[in-house]
Amino acid sequence: MTENLNSEPEVRDLAEIPAIEVITRAAVMLMSAAAEKLGLSEQDPSASPHLDLDEARKLITALAGLIQSSVADLGIHASALRDGLKSLQLAFREASAHPDEPGQGPGEKQTGPVAD
């Protein structure tokens, strides 16, 4: 949302927003929420009060599904979104006391096993 000169928020009609913008905004929101749940906003992620691997798993899996199902339409955004997803998947693996088997981590059913 942007603000006009009168400091009132500008509201856009959802029907006017291109689909690719809606998809990318949803992906960025899922990425940001997953990063928070992995504690990545803290210097020491393992000490984050927001660390919640169960919640992070759900968000990463939803993100993987969104990206994989939209990849043909993402154009120039596809690579960056895939890289962000992979980074979150690797951070999840690193944060897990007992990492999932390859191919069983969050979103890996959609993306395949994630490796460094």
Image (cartoon, rainbow, N blue to C red):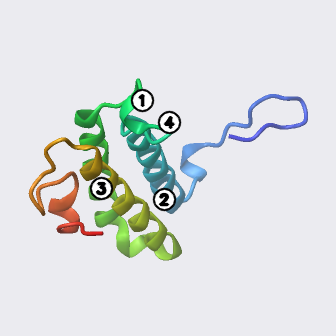
| View extreme (right): residue | 5
Residue to which mark 1 is pinned? 48
Residues marked 1 and 4 touching at CB (< 8 Å): yes
Front of the two marks 2 and 1: 1
Residue to which mark 4 is pinned? 42
Of residues 33 and 2, the one nearer the viewer is: 33
Real-space Cα distance between discs 1 and 3? 18 Å
Amino acid under label 3? Gln
Real-space Cα distance between discs 4 and 3? 18 Å
- Quarter containing the N terminus: top right
- Quarter containing the C terminus: bottom left
Q: Residue at the spot x=36%, y=40% of the render?
A: 38
Residue to which mark 2 is pinned? 19
Q: Earlier in the sequence, mark 1 or mark 3?
A: 1
Residues marked 2 and 4 touching at CB (< 8 Å): no
Of residues 100 and 110, the one nearer the viewer is: 100
Structural crowding at the residue carrying mark 3, measured as other residues with C-alpha within 10 Å and reported as few (<14), some (14–19) or many (≥20): many
Real-space Cα distance between discs 2 and 4? 33 Å
**Residue 83, quarter of picture:** bottom left
Residues marked 2 and 3 touching at CB (< 8 Å): no
Residue to which mark 3 is pinned? 89
| Residue 20 image point, x, y percent | 49, 62
Looking at the rendered structure, the secondary structure element under dot 1 is loop
| Residue 78 image point, x, y percent | 44, 71
